Amino acid sequence: MKNILMILTSHSKLENTDTKTGVWLGEFTDPYYEFKDAGYSITLASPHGGQPPVDEMSKMTENITASNKRFQDDEELKTAFSSTKKLSEIDPKDYDAVFFAGGHGPMFDLAKDPECGKIIVSFFNDGKPISAVCHGSAAFLSTENIDKNFLNGRRISCFTNTEETLVLKRGKVPYLLEDALKEKGAEIKSALVPFTTHVEQDGTIITGQNPVSAGPTARKLIEVLDNM
């Protein structure tokens, strides 16, 4: 059985607003059930461990996915979600792939978490798939203190500057993720139309652009794993 490590944010605060952030629920539940239904074992982790915050906007009717509804009736998963492991407790050798869920939170914590950087570099060096969706791609910024050139020339997808503007969050985040990744040398790939699906694969790195890309990104990761 393949073992997937899913990493979630522990951060809940945006800038210049009382609005909270956290995990974008569908960017966790859509991939989770793709992995579960494929027969994989899944471990949840976050910087602080325990219950990650959830972006309340992701619970609104227009953002609810079928997997969100499934989650509400899944007592086993809700228990696991409330008791994630700390990143410091994770040994990358125990897992076959890692997936970073989105929500604005990763821009604040995963982007600079030293344990996150170690995990990514370890997976990469071992030839294991690394996947992220939306703002989960901020996790790649954490590699800078280990390998300053890690992102140089890599094709990555993420929530774009245009999408950030359209959701009115530009003044509420510390930086624009697309710009930050480009500054480290990444080549950003995205759909021509905002908020439509885009999945990018560059070797063992698989990334998705936005919430609707979460399930397709997970399926691409499954495809890569099944062919390894």
Image (cartoon, rainbow, N blue to C red):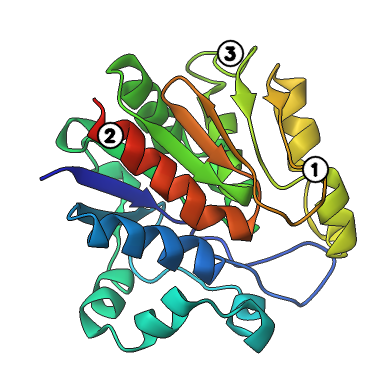
Tell me if mark 1 has few (under 14), some (14-19) or many (20+) residues whose alpha carbon lies within 10 angstroms of its own.
Answer: many
Q: Earlier in the sequence, mark 2 or mark 1?
A: 1
Q: Position of residue 6 (x, y in %)?
A: 35, 51
- Nearer the observer: mark 2 or 1; the answer is 2
Marks 2 and 1, how far apart in space? 31 Å
Tell me if mark 2 has few (under 14), some (14-19) or many (20+) residues whose alpha carbon lies within 10 angstroms of its own.
Answer: some
- Vertically, is 40 above or below 93? below
Q: Residue at x 47, y 17 (%)?
A: 146
Q: Where is residue 99 in the image (x, y as percent from the top left)?
A: 40, 45
Residue 148 is tagged as 3
Q: Earlier in the sequence, mark 3 or mark 1?
A: 3
Give amino acid for label 1: Leu
| Element assignment for label 1 | loop
Marks 2 and 3, how far apart in space? 27 Å
Q: In this view, does 43 lie to the left or right of 194?
A: left
- Of the 4 image quadrants, the one containing the N terminus is top left
- Nearer the observer: mark 2 or 3; the answer is 2
Give amino acid for label 2: Leu
